Image (cartoon, rainbow, N blue to C red):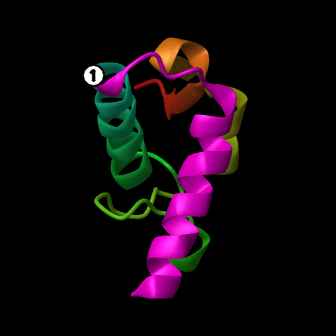
Amino acid sequence: MNAITERWVKTLRTELLDRMLIWNETHLRHALREYERHYNLHRTHRSLAAASPLRALPQALEPDQIKHLAIHRQDRLGGVIHEYRHAA
């Protein structure tokens, strides 16, 4: 568990805390909640074959779908985190 925790803390630090100025404890808690949501629901993980921990593997795209692909971007935490989704 120590190695897993160390990896999560390093990821948290490099992707969020090194890029953001934290004003107070309330702001820190809000940022941590948003990052945890992003980490578990959206961010891909190499060990899960590009899936996120709480979401199933993404469906493979057919070549004809790539031509008409529309992507929506949603910014989190003032633009520190960007989430991309396929438009339906």
- Tell me which residue sits at (70%, 47%) in the image: 63
Which residue is found at the position 40% from the left and 26% from the top?
Answer: 88
Q: Answer with the quarter of the image where residue 44 lies.
A: bottom right
Q: Is residue 88 left or right of residue 17?
A: left
Residue under pointer 1: 26
- Where residue 42 appears, x then y in whole percent? 43, 45
Q: Per the image, is 76 magenta? A: no
Q: Main secondary structure of the magenta part?
A: helix
78 or 60: which is nearer to us?
Answer: 78
* Residue 10 on the magenta segment: yes
Q: Quadrant of residue 65?
A: top right
Residue 18 appears anywhere in the view: yes
The residue that appears at 32% across and 27% down in the rendered structure is: 25
Q: Quadrant of residue 20?
A: top right
* Magenta-colored span: 1-25
The percent position of residue 72, horizontal first and vertical second, equals 53, 19
Residue 38 spot, x, y in % from top left:
41, 41
Name the residue at the front extreme. Answer: 24
Is residue 49 in sight in this rendering? no
